[in-house]
Image (cartoon, grey):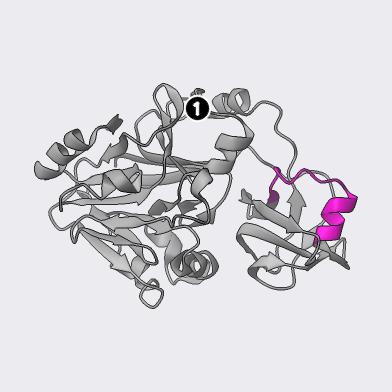
């Protein structure tokens, strides 16, 4: 069950012992009692009525059917590689990381190399703030068991399920590689100065300006048939640098995405055959902004609008979701 609820309604759920994944403004989450919950700050949501910005309600995912040995843990940059090993053999790990924190950077860069990453389901999101507060407020995550608000650590709910349940994690990505130039990076990282454009080392900022590339479109890499986006955060011509919302990786070929003409129509075409029994989902703030999703529904998917999505590794401009079914 996932719904927008008042602080008093969420308090009642916590006091009943429910396992919860929460998203909302810091002023609301900080009022909640200790219990079986994790949360992250964000004021943007996809609801049953459409895209919504709210600072007086909390988005609630009630996580049904968890076993008693489920657990909630916090991880700093030194302990983050343990997330996979700590995950249940049958179940999933729901992770929330504060945007811009060192744990955000470390997970983005190192998670693809964690041993066994793709053997145990990991899903989650990057907490954020009201865009009007960027640079003034820090995103936070909450460990409900301890009652602590965290600015630099990740919080994870390791959800143990009965053996007869099966977890499926998937993404919906409207973007595919365009037919343009090949872009290859020579170093991993969130910021770059140069790239190999069709094999020639070139200033990426100058390339974007000269080609008049729409920076609302991500770069897209083909990960063994799965299209993974790399969203552009900023292009600084003065320092000749391009920043991204996720790290670039060497050895992959990126291309500028094909334009999406109508996000809502194309999204609904992709989700019409998707299982409606979604336990958790989240969508990217860039999709919300660039496609003007306020007041518009995205099929049967509801959840926080995030500063990054996690389906095992960090993603951008993607909808991520999880389904639990019988084996």
Q: Position of residue 94 (x, y in %)?
A: 34, 53
Image position of 60 with respect to 160: above or below: above
Viewer-proximal residue, 110 or 192?
192
The quadrant of the picture occupied by the N terminus is: top left
What residue sits 35% from the left and 72% below the top?
Answer: 82
As drawn, is 133 to the left or to the right of 207?
left
Viewer-proximal residue, 245 or 163?
245
Image position of 56 with respect to 315: above or below: above
Magenta stretch in the rendered image: 205-219
Residue position for label 1: 298
Q: Position of residue 79 (x, y in %)?
A: 35, 75
The quadrant of the picture occupied by the C terminus is: top left
Viewer-proximal residue, 292 or 156?
292
What residue sits 80% from the left and 63% below the top?
Answer: 238
Residue 181 visible in rendering: no
Q: SS class of the residue under badge 1?
A: loop
């Amino acid at each position: 069950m996932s719904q927008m609820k008042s602080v008093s309604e969420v308090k009642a759920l916590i006091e009943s012992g429910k396992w919860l994944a929460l998203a909302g403004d810091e002023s609301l989450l900080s009022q909640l009692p200790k219990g079986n919950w994790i949360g992250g700050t964000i004021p943007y949501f996809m609801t049953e009525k459409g895209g919504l910005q709210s600072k007086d309600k909390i988005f609630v995912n009630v996580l049904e059917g968890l076993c008693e040995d489920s657990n909630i843990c916090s991880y700093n940059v030194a302990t983050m590689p343990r997330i996979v090993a700590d995950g249940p053999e049958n179940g999933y790990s729901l992770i929330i990381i504060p945007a811009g924190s060192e744990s955000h950077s470390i997970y983005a860069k190192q998670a693809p190399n964690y041993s066994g990453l793709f053997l145990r389901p990991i899903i989650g999101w990057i907490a954020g703030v009201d865009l009007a507060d960027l640079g003034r407020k820090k995103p936070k995550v909450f460990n409900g068991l301890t009652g602590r608000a965290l600015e630099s650590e990740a919080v994870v709910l390791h959800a143990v399920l009965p053996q007869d349940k099966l977890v499926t994690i998937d993404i919906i990505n409207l973007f595919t590689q365009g037919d343009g130039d090949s872009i290859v990076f020579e170093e991993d990282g969130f910021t770059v100065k140069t790239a190999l454009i069709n094999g020639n080392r070139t200033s990426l900022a100058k390339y974007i300006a000269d080609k008049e590339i729409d920076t609302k479109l991500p770069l897209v890499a083909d990960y063994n048939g799965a299209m993974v986006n790399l969203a552009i955060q900023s292009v600084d011509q003065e320092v000749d640098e391009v920043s991204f919302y996720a790290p670039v990786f060497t050895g992959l070929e990126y291309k500028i995405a094909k334009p999406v003409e109508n996000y809502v129509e194309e999204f609904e075409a992709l989700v019409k055959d998707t299982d409606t029994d979604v336990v958790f989902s989240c969508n990217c703030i860039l999709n919300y902004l660039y496609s003007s999703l306020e007041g518009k529904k995205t099929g049967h998917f509801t959840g926080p609008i995030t500063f990054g999505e996690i389906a095992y590794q960090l993603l951008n401009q993607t909808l991520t979701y999880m389904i639990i079914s019988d084996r």
